[in-house]
Image: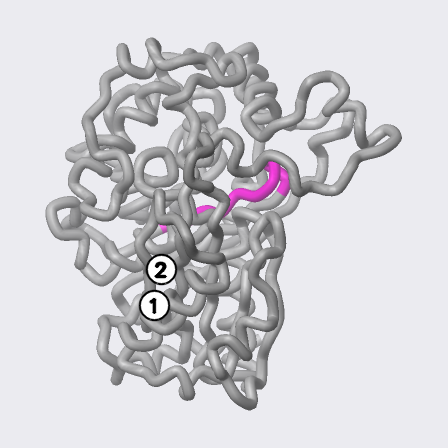
Amino acid sequence: MNITPTAIAGLGMTQLGKVYGRTPAEFAVEAVTRAAADAGLALADIDGLLVNPGVNNDTDLRLQSTLQLRDLRLLTTIQGFGSSAIQMVQYASMAISAGMANVVACVYADAPLKEGRGSGAAYAGGNRPLTGVEALPAAAGLKSAPARYAIAARRHMETYGTTSEQLGAVAVAARAWAAMNPLAQMREPITIDDHQNSRMIADPLRLLDCCLVSNGAIAIIVTSAERAADLAQPPVHIWGWGQAHPGYTSYRDSNFGLVSGAAQSGPAALRMAGVTVDEIDIREIYDCFTYTTLLTLEDYGFCAKGEGGEFVASGALAPGGSHPTNTGGGELSSYYMWGMTPLSEAVIQARGQGGQRQVAKNDLIMVSGNGGVLDFHATLIVSPHAKTR
């Protein structure tokens, strides 16, 4: 199949973090409006809209009417949880290649934080009741994402000798990048001791192993590379993508905790891009937990399976390291907008607009999206250069 070259031409970001008094739909309208303006387009130029409705389905197809968009040729919701952002880029690109649309806006918005309530309560409740066998994990105490990821992290530790201090190195590196990002929620540097002294959330995961909770929205504009070349911002060319959804987390003898969908989606994206993992300059990894970063880097092949702990502890991910990773601070220290967190930073780095944190060599950037508890995965490779391979 011949794929029309596509590019990300616009990026729209609202204020992110502890921003109260606004609905997800209101955030979404602002983000899409900003993304169009960033690209030098009018809202009327948009003929495709892909909406990630969030965990509570707070934003849906009615966003078209709120934005006063007319005669859309493409309109749907995409729900792959943390993998949704990359899926939206993929489907937008395929729609453009098929002639279904010319300019597609992709948006994620959320407002789980409530004033006067702790962030730990942000995602509590609102989910459908569980019955029968499906309810057994919750009955055993696995009632939250940290608890479920803790099981995965513990298996990696028991199998490969990964340590809590090595997970802490991921958090320290992310915070070092966030210190240079004016949009980051947490900019105060931290140490391994700070990590080890942070309270336990779900053994072995501590507070500083866990991502932030944020209100806000991020949107991007995808169009053909040819059209993007004439717009207001430097095009961020889309070179390759891949998806993988293991579906084995509840099965006996599965590789849960040891191998994620990144092991399949990463190579697929690399093959489509026509590059190798050694050619990647920047990694923007979905980091809902420090362990997720470590596992994804292993599965992508940046280090051997089981050697992720030593790799991240070496300083490779931090500013000045050999493998710049999560250069805006990621979800651990910057802001948590599901898969739009790593994707937005990839756009910023590809454009060369990272300011103090800009990585000098930005020819190829790998982006990951992870959903559920290692259930869903998507990978994207972007570049400031048009694809020639």
In percent of width and height, residue 198 lies at 36, 14
**Residue 324 versus residue 193: which sits nearer the camera?**
193
In percent of width and height, residue 384 lies at 26, 64
The residue segment tinted magenta is 366-375
Instruction: Locate residue 361 relative to residue 222 in the image: left or right.
Output: left
Is 369 covered by the magenta stretch? Answer: yes
**Residue 52 versus residue 114: which sits nearer the camera?**
114
**Residue 387 seen in this snapshot:** no
**Residue 169 versus residue 265: which sits nearer the camera?**
169
**Residue 318 seen in this snapshot:** yes
The quadrant the C terminus occupies is bottom left
Q: Which mark is residue 372?
A: none
In percent of width and height, residue 206 lies at 43, 17
Is 58 covered by the magenta stretch? Answer: no
Image point 60% across, 61% down: which residue? 78
Instruction: Locate residue 357 relative to residue 66 in the image: left or right.
Output: left
Image point 35% across, 78% down: which residue? 225
Mark 2 and mark 1: span between their CA atoms? 5 Å
Q: Are marks 2 and 1 in contact (CB under 8 Å)?
A: yes
Q: Amino acid at mark 2?
A: Val
Q: Local crowd at mark 2 within 10 Å, few (<14), some, or many (≥20)? A: many
Q: Residue furthest right?
A: 132
Q: Secondary structure at mark 1?
A: strand
Q: Which mark is residue 382?
A: 2
Does 134 appear above or below 157?
Answer: below
Label whose residue precedes the other's in the sequence (2 or 1):
1
Image point 56% across, 13% down: which residue? 159
Q: Which residue is mark 1?
A: 237
Q: Secondary structure at mark 2?
A: strand
**Residue 192 versus residue 69: which sits nearer the camera?**
69
Q: Which quadrant would residue 143 be assigned to in this image? A: top right
The quadrant the N terminus occupies is bottom right
